[in-house]
Image: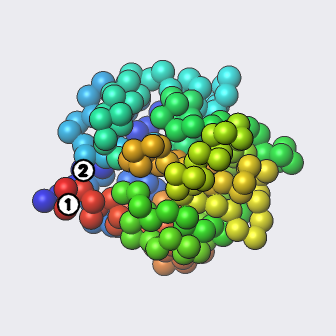
């Protein structure tokens, strides 16, 4: 059985092609979706990729959240479909309230582009099951609105419920509270993170690391065994 994973392109998206490629490298089928699509073309999971959708006007992700495609993504995510938001995709997921918290501008006000060390805190999501909890990985980070914030009660609940999925290690690159780089929703099917796993899936490209491939092999296994 093949697994169909949708990748949404909004006006201003940058990383849709790399995401499609990462999905194919893992062995799944990448299905391009357009922001005006109402139907999700029978995909089994969706990735919202990185970039500057709608130019990041108003706030990153604030306009994309109202795209026709997001109406269906929100409905299906609430019904359990796995959704991954990478960087701008994570920003969109907080704007839709599928994920708690919000993204602010980096505390030093500069764009960051670096190879970032992370700890995988949870291998219990469909996007991280090929990692082990506590595993350290390096994947690229590149954004300006990367500072994850939420109120203390929400942060305490996220930690108590094991919903912090990734934490920054060595350097907190943006002032994110409690070093949080990625979180999941209560059901565990929706995951968002600021760094970019799709840019680290092939040894001949970029830094040569393949630490990001596990996202895509995890979801493939989950869908094939469903
Ligand atoms: N790489 C990206 O997805 C960029 C994210 C975002 N628009 C920012 O700069 O914060």
Q: Are marks 2 and 1 in contact (CB under 8 Å)?
A: no
Give residue 167's position: percent from left, percent from top.
Answer: 64, 61
Q: How many residues crowd mark 1 within 10 Å: few (<14), some (14–19), many (20+)? A: few
Q: Is residue 138 left or right of residue 192?
A: right
Check disc 2: other Cα within 10 Å, few if <14, some if 14-19, many if 20+. Answer: many
Identify the residue at image location x=60%, y=68%: 119
- Mark 1 falls on what kind of element? helix
Identify whether 19 is placed above or below 214: above
Q: Quadrant of the C terminus?
A: bottom left
What is the CA distance from the residue labelled 2 to the residue labelled 1? 10 Å
Frontmost of labels 2 and 1 is 1
Q: Is residue 172 above or below residue 98?
A: below
Of 19 and 105, the residue lying toward us = 105
User: Height in image: 218 above or below 178?
Assistant: below
Tell me the residue at 68%/62% (across/down).
168
Image mark for residue 132: none
Q: Quadrant of residue 135?
A: bottom right
Q: Which numbered circle lies on residue 4?
A: 2
The quarter of the rendered structure image containing the N terminus is bottom left
Mark 2 CB within 8 Å of ligand 1: no
**Which residue does the image show at 51% across and 29% down from the upper left?**
96
Identify the colour scheme used: rainbow
Mark closest to the chain's N terminus, 2 or 1: 2
Front residue of 129 and 212: 129
Disc 1 Cβ-to-ligand 1 distance below 8 Å: no
Which residue appears farthest toward the right when viewing the image? 108
The circle on residue 224 is 1
Q: Is residue 79 left or right of residue 61?
A: left
Viewer-side residue, 222 vs 92: 222
Percent x, y of residue 59:
67, 28
């Amino acid at each position: 059985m093949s697994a169909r994973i949708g990748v949404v392109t909004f006006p201003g998206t940058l990383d849709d092609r790399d995401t499609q490629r990462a999905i194919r490298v893992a062995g799944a089928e990448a299905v391009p979706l357009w922001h005006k699509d109402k139907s999700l073309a029978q995909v089994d999971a969706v990735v919202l990729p990185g970039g500057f959708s709608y130019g990041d006007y108003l706030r990153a992700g604030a306009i994309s959240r109202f795209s026709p495609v997001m109406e269906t993504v929100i409905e299906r995510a609430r019904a359990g479909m796995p959704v991954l938001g990478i960087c701008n995709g994570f920003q969109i997921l907080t704007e839709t309230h599928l994920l708690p918290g919000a993204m602010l501008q980096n505390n030093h006000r500069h764009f960051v582009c670096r190879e970032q060390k992370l700890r995988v805190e949870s291998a219990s999501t469909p996007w991280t099951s090929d990692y082990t909890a506590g595993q350290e990985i390096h994947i690229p980070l590149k954004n300006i609105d990367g500072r994850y914030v939420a109120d203390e009660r929400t942060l305490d609940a996220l930690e108590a419920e094991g919903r912090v999925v990734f934490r920054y290690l060595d350097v907190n690159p943006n002032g994110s509270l409690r070093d949080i780089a990625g979180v999941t929703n209560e059901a565990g099917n929706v995951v968002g993170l600021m760094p970019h796993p799709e840019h680290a899936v092939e040894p001949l490209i970029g830094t040569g690391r393949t630490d990001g491939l596990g996202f895509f092999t995890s979801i493939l296994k989950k869908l094939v065994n469903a």
